[in-house]
Amino acid sequence: MAPKKDGPGPGAYMLPSTIGYAKTDYRKTRSPRYSFGLRSQSSYEEDGPGPAAYKLGSVTRYGKATNLKFSMLHRGELE
């Protein structure tokens, strides 16, 4: 099966850039190429401890890992 050539591909169009100030697309907002400023403080450092901060050795994804417990007593009153 051969590919169809109905029209031009996406590389045939030369769209203007949206970065910088020279030859930019007038329909889009302009943004600087580089910025010289301070980074804003990220909030992920203050959220709390990560998942490795807790010792959960006996807990699995199915619940607490324990042995089966049997008893010779009945559970309660039967009707």
Image: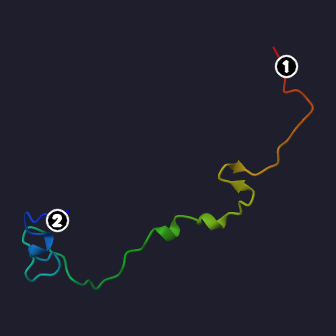
Q: Nearer the viewer, residue 43 or 9?
A: 9
Q: Is 52 placed left or right of 28 in the picture? A: right
Q: Nearer the viewer, residue 46 or 30?
A: 30
Say the numbered circle drawn on residue 57: none
Which residue lies at the image location 7% right of the left edge and 81% below the top edge? Answer: 23
Q: Nearer the viewer, mark 2 or mark 1?
A: 2
Q: Is 4 placed left or right of 67 in the picture? A: left
Coordinates of residue 2 in the picture (x, y in percent) = 17, 65
Secondary structure category for the residue under label 1? loop
Could you tell me if residue 29 is visible in this image?
no
Coordinates of residue 10 in the picture (x, y in percent) = 14, 70
- Image quarter hosting the C terminus: top right
The quarter of the displayed image where residue 70 is located: top right
Mark 1 burial class by Cα count in 10 Å: few <14, some 14-19, many 20+: few
Q: Nearer the viewer, residue 2 or 53?
A: 2
Residue type marked 2: Pro
Residue 50 vs 16, above or below: the answer is above
Coordinates of residue 74 in the picture (x, y in percent) = 88, 26
Residue 78 vs 71, above or below: the answer is above
Q: Is 29 placed left or right of 39 in the picture? A: left
The residues tagged by marks 2 and 1 sit, at their Cα atoms, a distance apart of 77 Å
Residue contact at pointers 2 and 1, CB within 8 angstroms: no
Residue 79 vs 60, above or below: the answer is above
Disc 2 target residue: 3
Say the numbered circle drawn on residue 77: 1
Secondary structure category for the residue under label 2? loop
Coordinates of residue 21 in the picture (x, y in percent) = 11, 81
Residue type marked 1: Glu
Question: Which comes before the other along the chain, label 2 or label 1?
Answer: 2
Which residue lies at the image location 37% right of the left edge and 75% below the top edge? Answer: 40
Could you tell me if residue 30 is visible in this image?
yes
